[in-house]
Amino acid sequence: MKVIICGAGQVGWQIARHLSGERNDVTVVDSKPDLVRRATESLDVQGLTGFASYPDVLEAAGARDAEMIIAATHSDEVNMVVCQIAHSVFGVPRKIARLRAQPYLNAIYSDLYRRDHLPIDVVISPEREVAEAALQRLSAPSTFDSESFLEGRVRLLGMVLEEDCPVLMTPLRQLSDLFSTLRSIVVGVRRDGILFAPEPGDQLYADDQIYVITPREDVNRTLEIFGKATKKQSRIVIVGGGNVGLAVAKRLEARTDRVRVKMIERDRATAEIAADALERTIVLNGDGLDMELLTEANIERADAVLAVTDDDKVNLLTAVRGKAAGSAMTIALLNDPSLVPLLGPLNIDAYINPRSTTVSSILRHVRHGRVRGVYSLGDAEAEVIEAQVLSTMPMAGKEVRDIDFPEGVLVGAIARGDKVLKPTGSLRVLEGDVLVLFSLAADVPEVERLLQVSIDFF
């Protein structure tokens, strides 16, 4: 597939890394020569320096025969113009744009993006994606990562195993014997910084970071089995009242169970906007690092502190101060992945990476076959893929044990109708099933091959 990526920043670079690694023909366009050079020197991509909204630049990038264009520059307006030109001048079939400004995302203006108006096939909002990721973390307070699949029926949980975990030193195959009705599958283990797909005979150790795929009904039991608390969160402090913090607070207010939310925002104008937009949330104007203000927000009684300002270091320090003051859980928004190793030493429970969430959102609209969802793990180390099985796919009609999956791929769950099934080796995969697969990054191209349909389907 020939893809043009406009914008070679963090998101654009990661998308280029994914797609070029899967043998796609990728061209990166950016106005900054150093960003283009970084992409071409570190990735198997072509690069072009220029303004992506200029028709001649898009033509030089190969827009006339491109199958997809991804507009991920830092300017919403440039991204819109890129999609318009790609459609009107070059007839690019699929156009994806990243839009940040909330007025562009208002539901009452959704008609704007119709093909005969402003032709954008998929609009990606980083703020909304990050807000959703924050809610996922809050919903599973003892996890460092969490994501939903199969319309919320299946969850991915990332957990760090402690010394008191009841199932340490237990071969994974024995978990099925010990908990025969449990449908959870350990699909990934990160040990000493290396992520791998475990085999049935592998054991788990303290300090392992594990990824588990489990049906929604089994989440609490799964957390308990791995020694994690399942306490309900009713008091939450949000530090940062920008688009992300505001979106999270609105969603928390909309929940049926009453959640007490307090928000701290340093900028007075932003705090006033948040206060006007929220009904039950108490908005405090001041510095989230001010202990007096944190005390006023009852930080010592908070079930969770969510630090989502636009400054990574402020988020880290706020989370540290919140934990020291007595908060049960702290979550920090981090744009810089190099800061992630500091979470353990600083006793911060979880983090949200805007780049990772945005990349995951874009990838789910890029994949081949009947892929319905993609979630990127870690620093693009692996993906969890949700895909529907069609009659002419190589895996259709085979038992799970007979499907030629690479070593780095595991089936985490299978949905058949309204049921979620545990993927045992003898379970036969049928047409219409929806699979949730864990795949190490190097094995994603082979997964895509397995998910492709034969010419007979058409």
Image (cartoon, rainbow, N blue to C red):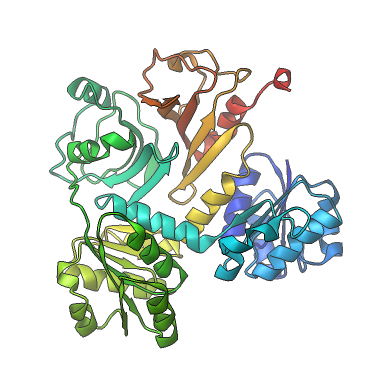
Q: Residue at x 75, y 65 (%)?
A: 81
Image location of residue 279, percent across then percent down: 34, 71
The residue that appears at 79% across and 56% down in the rendered structure is 86
For the point 60% across and 32% down, which residue is it? 370
* Position of the N terminus by quadrant: top right
The quarter of the picture where the C terminus appears is: top right
The percent position of residue 366, horizontal first and vertical second, equals 63, 43
Whether residue 156 is situated above or below residue 408 in the rendered picture: below
Depth check, front residue: 343 or 134: 134
> Where in the figure is residue 188, as x and y percent of width and height?
37, 37
Q: Is residue 43 left or right of residue 279?
A: right
Residue 149 drawn above or below residue 98: above
Image location of residue 450, percent across then percent down? 58, 25
Location of residue 130 (image quadrant): bottom left
Question: In the figure, residue 389 lies in which quadrant?
Answer: top right
Tell me, yes or no, if residue 132 can be seen here: yes
Residue 325 quadrant? bottom left
Above or below, 102 relative to 197: below
